[in-house]
Amino acid sequence: IDALSMLCRIFAAKKSDFKIKLESDQSALLLAAIPDASKVIAPDQIHSSKLTECMLSWGFERLKTSILSFLKALCDQMEEEENIIFWIDDLHWADKDSLRIIQSIVKYVEAASLGAFVFVGSF
């Protein structure tokens, strides 16, 4: 989540006019999980009243799907020469669900041939 938060801040700083449009429920879930996502999600998709409802009713799979949609939207806006390096430190402290999300992101990036991502994990 910290890495995604930092990615939002970087995109917001580099591309001030850049705003992602996702399904409103995905936006609500991402905003609940990653507050800095508000910097890159279109303002008309930010509905705070839906946050609690989404967090209570959605499970891990929906969060994972929302994160993958979010990353795809970011990749679509990247310049060809831009790259993202995800450095995730202290992987030995990661819980099972966090590791499953990381694994899903890596598989998604490989399957989609998104050469812009480099993953580095450390202990």
Image (cartoon, rainbow, N blue to C red):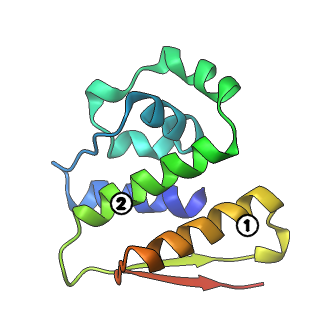
Query: What distance separates the C-alpha of mark 1 from that of mark 2?
Result: 19 Å
Question: Sequence order check: which comes first, mark 1 or mark 2?
Answer: 2
Callout 2, which amino acid?
Lys
Residue on which the image places disc 2: 72
Q: Residue furthest top?
A: 49
Residue at 78% in and 84% down: 123
Depicted 122 relative to depicted 60: above or below: below
The answer to which of 60 and 111 lies nearer the viewer is 111
User: Residue 9, located in which quarter of the rendered image?
Assistant: bottom left
Residue 86 position (above or below residue 2): below
Task: Determine the residue positioned at 26% across, 80% down.
Answer: 82
8 relative to 112, above or below: above
In the rendered image, which residue does mark 1 sit on? 99
Q: Neighbour class for label 1 at 10 Å: few (<14), some, many (≥20)?
A: some
Residue 48: x, y in percent? Answer: 48, 20
Q: Nearer the viewer, residue 50 or 108?
A: 108
